[in-house]
Every structure is written in C-alpha cells, then in structure tokens.
Amino acid sequence: MMPLIGGKFGVYAAAVAAKTARVHPPGKRLAGILIPAFSPRREGDLGIGDTQALHEWVDWAADQGVGFIQLLPINENGPDESPYSAISSAALDPIYLTLDGTRLPWLAEADVTRTREHLGAALQAERVDYPAVRHAKRTLLELAWSMFNAAEKDFEKDFERFRSEEAEWLDDYCLFRFLMEHHGESLTWDRWPESCQTPHKARAFLEKLRRGDPPAVDCRLGFFAFVQWLCHRQWQALREHADSRGVKLMGDVPIGISWHSCDVFFQRDEFHLDWCGGSPPEGMSQSDSFFQQWGQNWGIPLYRWDHMEGNGFRWWRTRIARLTRIFQMFRLDHILGFYRIYAFPWRPERNHEFLGLSHEQAAEKNGGHLPRWFLRPDDTVENKAANRADGDVRLRAVLEAANGAEVIAEDLGWVPDYVRPHLTDLGIAGFRIPHWDCNEFGHPTPGNSFPEHSFATFSTHDHDPMNGIWRGCLRVIQQHHENPTEHSGWQSHGAHNTLRILSEFAGIPIPVDGPWPPFSEGIRLRLTKALLASNSRHAVMMITELFGLDVRINEPGTRGGDNWTFRLPWTLGQIEGDPWLNEICRKFAAVVSITRRSI
C-alpha cells in the first residue's frame, strides 16, 4: 500500500543511492520486463494501469528474481495519447494515479464506486478507452480537490512545500493547463486568441482574469498543482517500494517534446519552430506511401542546440534531474538525434500536400526548403567528426545530470559508424537485438559475444514481440506459397532469413527440407534462455513475449487506432491462480536464476 506522505522532493534519489548500490552492485547482470504503465490490470482499477498495479508488479518482479521494470514515458500525454508527444517535460500524467479513499482521504468509497459504475464496459475492455478513463479520473480528482480545499488541511504544509520547491516549472505548467481549459482542451496554443499568444501576453491575460474573480482563478491554478502533487507523491512512493524490494524502475526520455507543449510555449528560444524532427525515407520496405517517399515526420520541434549549449543545457539538465527522482535507469530515445537528426521544414498536418511531388515541386511549394539532415549529414569524414563532437558535448551534459543513474541508448536504425564506439567511450549501453545483429556472412552474433555494457532484447514497443515475429514470418511464407508474386517472394525470403537467424541464435534445429515449426512453448523457452544467457548486463523481455501475446504496442508512423492502448488480459491475481500462466512465470524465474549470474 502506498502512503500519501513521503520525504522531501529532490533529495530522495541521493539518499537511497548507497542502498541501491548494495542491492544491485556494478557487474550484476539483470533481467527485466517491459510493461507500459497503461497495461497492467488489478482489482479495483479504473480501466487503465496505475501506480498500485505497478506496485504489485514490483512485488512480482522481486519474487521472480527480475531486477528491473522498464516503462514507457509517464509525462502528461497530448491529445493523441502518445507517451512520446508529451505536453510537459516535467508534469506527470494523472491518468496513472491510483484513486481511492486510502490514497486520497478526501474521496469517499461511494464516489469511487459510482465512478466505476459510470465507466461500465471501459473497466474490463480489452483496450484502454482514454476518453472514458480520463473523464472518470478527472471527475474524482475534481471532487478530491473540492474536499481538500474545503476541509481541515492536514496536508497543506506538504502541498505548499511542493508548490514552492517545484515553482520553476509548476507555475508555468498550471498557467498553461488553465489556458488549455479556458480555450478548450482540443485547441492548441498556436490557435489561442492573440491576447494569449506569447508568455508575456498569457501572464497578462491571467492577471486580468484574476482581477475579475481572484478566488476562481486561484482555485483552478491550485487544482492543477494539486494533481501534480498527487502524481509526484505516488510515483515517489512507488520508487521507495521498488528500492525496498531490490527492483529498479527504468524510465524513458523521448528525443522530442510536443510542438504544442508547455515547454515550447514558454521556452521558445530553446527550439526551432520551423523544423520538425523525424526519420529519413526507407523506400519500398515501408507500406506507408509518405514514409516511402519522404520519411517519418514526427512533428517535434528541433532543439536549438547552440542556444542550449550557451546556457549549459539547462533544459536538459533539469529534465534529467527530475526523471532520476523516480528512475534509477532510463532509456534515451533515438540517441542518434543527439548527433544529427532528419528534419522536415513543414509540420505533419501538411504532409499530404507533398505526397507524390518531386523534390523540385516540393521545394517550389515550400520556399526552397526540403527535408534534410540537421545540422549536417554524415556524408564526409569532416561532417562525421563534427556530428560526433556535437553528440559528445550534449550527452556529457545528460550524463552529468543523471548523477549516476544508468543510461541506455536506443541506438537502432541506420547507425553511423562512429556512434557505438562513442557510446562505449561514454559508458552508455546500447541495444542489441539478436536478429538485427549479424556479421558480414549473415549469421547472428552469439549472445556470449555481446558487449557486457549493452541492453539485449528481441523487440521494443515499436515492433512485434518475438512470438509475433515468428508467427508473422510463417504467415508471410504461407501467403507466398498460396499466391506467389515477385513482391511476396522478396518478403518470403526475408521471413525465412529471420527464422534462420533466430534459430541459430537460440540453438533451435533448422529444418533442411521441411517447413518451419509453429511457435511453441519449447521455442519460446529456447529464445528466452538464449537472450538471458547473453553477455549483456541488461536483458529484457516484453510482457507480451512472456505470455506469448501477438500484440504490438505501437505502429510507428501512425496515430490513433490501437496504439498505446494494450492491456494485459489478466490481473496478477488471475495469473497466479491460473496453472498455465503461473507455470510460465515459474519457468521464467528458473531461467532468470540460471542465466543472470554476476559477471
């Protein structure tokens, strides 16, 4: 059970550092489980994973010998509900709050029960119903705030201390959320009235409203601060519990922040608002026609790295320092973007205007500007050296701000040859994905040859789990057998190659003339053992891989749909009470105990 009251913010991580080092000293090989915060179920939840559900999974991890739980970003989502497009680099998403009378004593159980009844089918739905869940949790938070505001404020000093200590980001955030509410949640800041279009005008607008009705304005600002106070308290309590069980929480730092975020609105000097980050085109390997021609336009504004360097990377340092209050290790998303990034001179809303145009036509339409590498491509020795030097300065600032927290680099994609050696020099662990990590002859790198300071996994949230990869390859081969074409033949060849590489890596017999075997418990165990027995200090399985669920958490380059909505079909209680599911956990724990020994 997570207490509401905890220690002072900002000092907890330092206070437990020595204890944590004793629990998992350097050289300890850890197994991990990736489970998004929105995915776990528990009895009494409100249609989405929450801090209490994660509390239960920390206990599960400790009992299985699992050393860390990997999460996706937990900052407050934007309208598209992507955790990689947050509206604040500091504010946490209240959708993950555990809302009951124990954690919020201003709520009556009858209020929670009534809310659960109104949620109806969304409570047990296969996928997260974000509109319904957000409305339900917002209703309870508003009620809790009204009672907190009206009652004897036993927690007033703690709340006011939080507001004072976090004022540097919290005051702007509360104003930003106030303006979002005032103008309509769906209206982005660039569409607000002229009277609120700049930070100075926004603050003047607020003071004008405050003069008219001070209590009402201050109450709304207080509400948004109250919600963040609750978020930070519950996540700090989760960190304390994880430390007590010897389990690390692993966070995630997106490469970008939403164009429509509080950060961009108030700190525009830190960003290039005319350029959006993304990734280059990959031709016919992608089904999306825009991606084939132009690449992925993520819509995130580029950083003005020169300006950031001039102020000592203040924005990055504060972002990382806040993160490490909760997480002992974290993943840097798209670390290649610290060296150079592919950039679009238009926002994603305009993508359709350029589909099918030639480069000449697109340049004429867009004032001569075309997508390009920013600041420079890796096309010469001199440019590579300059990009490496830029990445070195930026990443050293991140490492200093991390203050000993472990940093993992998401270094996937087309990786320049200087990146991985440089990450090794910095002591930043990179990813190792067995079926992508092959030698010049097409054979997988053996797990015992993985660098010790690396992070091994079969998949990320942007890919199919290993079971989905195996079954997907079988489907592609079968489809080509039934309806052979040149394109299906190319796909079938790739599927055969993937199955061969996975089999070689895990020591699975490769059929000579017969068909590939269907995915089975035996294949799952061999793949799991091979990954966890690798030399990588960290090896992680997605929760979908543990239970053989062919579910993809996100389809890159798409919005909406089923992205970011996956929920486990069972609570932990149901898993432990089911003989088959419990046996999967038992076997996994046995593999962990055998393979993840100290180096």
Image (cartoon, rainbow, N blue to C red):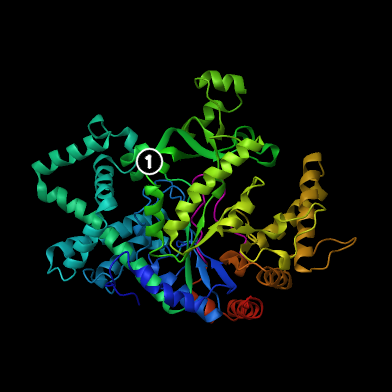
| Camera-side residue of 41 and 282 | 282
Is residue 190 positioned above or below 103 on the image? above
Residue 288, percent across and down? Answer: 62, 38
Q: Is residue 23 above or below residue 490?
A: below
Q: Quadrant of residue 210?
A: top left
Q: Residue at x 28, y 49 (%)?
A: 173
Could you say which is closer to the camera, residue 227 or residue 254?
254
Q: Residue at x 37, y 44 (%)?
A: 311
Asked whether, in this view, residue 346 is left or right of residue 147, the answer is right
* Region in magenta: 549-568
Give the x, y percent position of residue 250.
Answer: 48, 64
Corner quadrant of residue 521: bottom right
Q: Position of residue 280 (x, y in %)?
A: 61, 37
Q: Is residue 260 left or right of residue 518?
A: left
Q: Magenta residues: mostly which secondary structure?
A: loop
In the image, residue 406 lies in the stretch drawn in magenta = no
Work out whether 33 lies above or below 352.
Answer: below
Of 400 and 476, which appears nearest the observer? 400
Q: Is residue 500 left or right of residue 456?
A: right
